[in-house]
């Protein structure tokens, strides 16, 4: 582009045009592509199904139920005294994902958590494993009576969904 | 070859002048000069083309009856099996066709690896091949999700969850992939769309693959260049057309054996149970052709680490042209490398076996060793041997070994007669 000597050093009008054209094209392409990517995100009808109410009265101590919330299983377990004591007695510094039992429950009798293994999404089996909690058969993750990961490839504790007690015997998840 | 070609008919001449398709065909199929010493390991290219076309045709007709909705998919596949005319045949062809496709592609890749077909000047042919392999994996995985059985559902769950290992954005990315907070209808529909699309992308890559091949021409079992204008080559037609067709017929007989006598032996019976998001099957195993990579995934105790290693196991293949430092192509003339080649094959088969077993105890330990060895082969053994090894002397031309064998035979015969 050495049409005249000045253009070597000076910023020319043409440089300016190149840059502005280039930037506007990039922004334009980005804006045009976005809807094609965003359409894949969870849609309004999926988001609308986001909460569920559960009646806890039929569950006796030591029993658990599984309900479906957002297409995922949620475990609701009425824990026994022993299980609670076991969960609370653990030194949290020893845990791969340190959390106290108290921070994982609203009432210590009721453990509510998403029943999806934090490794690759299988459903752990109850009353199993080396820590009397849950055991995931897929790649061998062991969870304790608070749903915390103790052994195996899963990186995190079982997720606690957001929920509230509407009264003593009903919770609302989501 | 192509320059000398003129169509015979008047219409042919008229057409070819405007669009030289006939010249293209004559140059790249009929007269294409091919080394005369290719063995049956070279027939898998044709077999793979057959597999791709079979999958596209059978897939197309299955898609006329299949419904990609989580509530209907399983029933629609049963409908194909029971009600649709010849539906059982079309589905068994498609399902077993996928397995046959992978048998052929693994043998084709093993051939290239043994004879150094990835070396200068054929690096791009090999790299395009690695991309085809990647797309095949994606296509077959998504296809397996479509019948919406237990293995479909849980396979999809486990594999899409791999993306949640990505730091920071993992969860957003998996929800984006699912279009939901779990695997469901949204995912099934998009998998069907992509499963339909990808074979055509593969088709495009196959054209590039063959184009890149036809620039330098075929490698051959001796791994040496053909001498231009010599008797080293023969026209593709009829010599290799006949050889390829013969191999294809044998391949089809085996294929038909599966389809008609044991159509479900390569599959998993759990996939005849409809998907249940509340119950994980006892053992989740992928289709047999993914087992070695699945074993690598499980060998690593860390989620992100496992994913990285599994992806690397395939990605590393693309770098082989530069990891192999030897100038000699064919392992026939590489006494040391040849032994490690077979070790690698054994290691890969071992990984496949381990992938089918529960990853506990001794299996886990062997799995880790086998994974380590797989990578060692490429990063350490391959580059080192190129420096250490003293290759056997190469023949001067591809005719030489054949001629000298014949000469020897003639001598022996002469001596016997005397
Ligand atoms: C690279 C080529 C292809 C491969 C490797 C492949 C692989 C697969 C596999 C493994 C399945 C599951 C079979 C089963 O267990 O039932 C499947 C299903 C299916 N595929 Fe493909 N496929 C290919 C091309 C296509 C194409 C081009 C189409 C559409 C035009 C298609 C349409 C379907 C349909 C509708 C199903 C569901 C029906 C069934 O499960 O049998 N496929 N595919
Ligand atoms: S999915 Fe639970 S251990 Fe892998």
Image (cartoon, coloured by chain):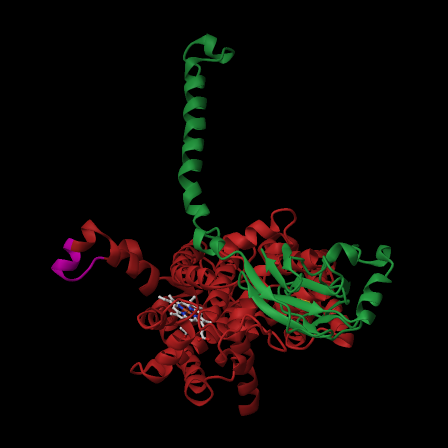
Chain colours: A green, B red
Q: Is residue B115 visible?
A: no
- Residue B101 visible: yes
B41 or B295: nearer the viewer: B295
Q: Residue at x 55, y 51 (%)?
A: B173
Single out the residue that lies furthest toward the front.
Answer: A167
B281 displayed left or right of A101? left
Q: Is residue B218 above or below residue A18?
A: below
Foreground residue among B82 and B346: B82
**Residue at x 34% of width, y 69% of height:** B63
Task: Give the percent coordinates (x, y) of residue B194.
Answer: 42, 59
Q: Is residue B356 above or below residue A86?
A: below
Q: Residue furthest left?
A: B10
Locate residue B87, reporting x and y percent.
34, 80
Residue A23 in the image, given as x and y percentages of width and height = 45, 27
- Residue B296 x, y percent position in the rendering: 67, 65
Q: Residue at x 63, y 54 (%)?
A: A162
B232 and B135: which is toward the camera: B135
Relative side of A166 to A35, left or right: right
Q: Is residue B7 magenta?
A: yes
Tell me where the magenta segment starts and ends, as one range: B6-14
Residue B326 in magenta stretch: no
Picture quadrant of residue A64 = bottom right
For the N terminus of chain A, the image quarter is top left
Q: Quadrant of ligand 1?
A: bottom left
Quarter holding residue A150: bottom right
């Amino acid at each position: 582009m050495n049409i005249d000597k000045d253009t070597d050093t000076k910023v020319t009008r043409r440089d300016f045009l190149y840059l502005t054209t280039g930037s506007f094209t990039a922004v334009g392409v980005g804006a045009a592509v976005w809807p094609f990517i965003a359409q894949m995100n969870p849609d309004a009808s999926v988001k609308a199904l986001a909460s569920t109410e559960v009646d806890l009265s039929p569950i006796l101590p030591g029993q658990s139920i599984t309900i479906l919330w957002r297409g995922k299983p949620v475990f609701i377990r009425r824990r026994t005294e022993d299980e609670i004591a076991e969960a609370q007695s653990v030194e949290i510094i020893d845990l791969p994902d340190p959390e106290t039992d108290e921070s994982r429950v609203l009432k210590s009798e009721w453990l509510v958590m998403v029943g999806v293994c934090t490794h690759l999404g299988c459903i752990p089996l109850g009353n199993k494993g080396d820590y009397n909690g849950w055991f995931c058969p897929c790649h061998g993750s062991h969870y304790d009576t608070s749903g915390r990961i103790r052994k195996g490839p899963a990186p995190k504790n079982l997720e606690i969904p957001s929920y509230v007690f509407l009264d003593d015997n009903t919770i609302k998840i989501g | 070859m192509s320059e000398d070609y003129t169509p015979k008919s008047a219409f042919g001449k008229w057409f070819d002048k405007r669009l030289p398709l006939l010249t293209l065909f004559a140059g790249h199929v009929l007269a294409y000069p091919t080394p005369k010493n290719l063995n049956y390991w070279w027939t898998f290219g044709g077999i793979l083309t057959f597999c791709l076309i079979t999958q596209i045709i059978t897939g197309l007709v299955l898609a006329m009856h299949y419904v990609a909705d989580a509530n209907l998919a399983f029933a629609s596949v049963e409908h194909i099996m029971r009600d649709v005319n010849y539906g059982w045949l079309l589905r068994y062809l498609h399902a077993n066709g996928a397995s046959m496709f992978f048998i052929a592609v693994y043998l084709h890749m093993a051939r290239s690896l043994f004879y150094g077909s990835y070396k200068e000047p054929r690096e791009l042919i090999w790299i395009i091949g690695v991309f085809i392999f990647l797309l095949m994996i994606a296509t077959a995985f998504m296809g397996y999700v479509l019948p919406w059985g237990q293995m479909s559902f849980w396979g999809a769950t486990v594999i899409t969850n791999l993306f949640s290992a990505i730091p920071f954005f993992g969860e957003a990315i998996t929800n984006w992939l699912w279009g939901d907070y779990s695997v469901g209808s949204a995912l099934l529909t998009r998998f069907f769309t992509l499963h339909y699309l990808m074979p055509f992308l593969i088709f495009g890559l196959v054209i590039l693959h063959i184009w890149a091949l036809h620039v330098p021409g075929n490698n051959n079992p001796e791994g040496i260049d053909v001498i231009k204008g010599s008797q080293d080559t023969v026209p593709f037609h009829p010599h290799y057309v006949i050889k390829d067709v013969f191999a294809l017929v044998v391949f089809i007989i085996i294929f038909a054996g599966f389809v008609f006598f044991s159509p479900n032996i390569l599959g998993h019976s759990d996939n005849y149970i409809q998907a249940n998001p509340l119950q994980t099957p006892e053992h989740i195993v992928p289709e047999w052709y993914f087992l070695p990579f699945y074993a690598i995934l499980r060998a690593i105790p860390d989620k992100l680490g496992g994913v990285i290693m599994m992806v690397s196991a395939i990605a590393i293949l693309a770098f082989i042209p530069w990891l192999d430092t030897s100038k000699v192509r064919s392992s026939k003339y590489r006494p040391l490398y040849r032994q490690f080649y077979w070790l690698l094959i054994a290691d890969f088969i071992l990984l496949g076996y381990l992938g089918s077993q529960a990853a506990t105890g001794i299996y886990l330990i062997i799995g880790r060793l086998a994974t380590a060895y797989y990578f060692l082969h490429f990063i350490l053994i391959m580059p080192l041997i190129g420096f250490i090894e003293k290759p056997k002397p190469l023949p001067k031309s591809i005719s030489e070994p054949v001629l000298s064998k014949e000469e020897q035979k003639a001598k022996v015969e002469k001596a016997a007669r005397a």
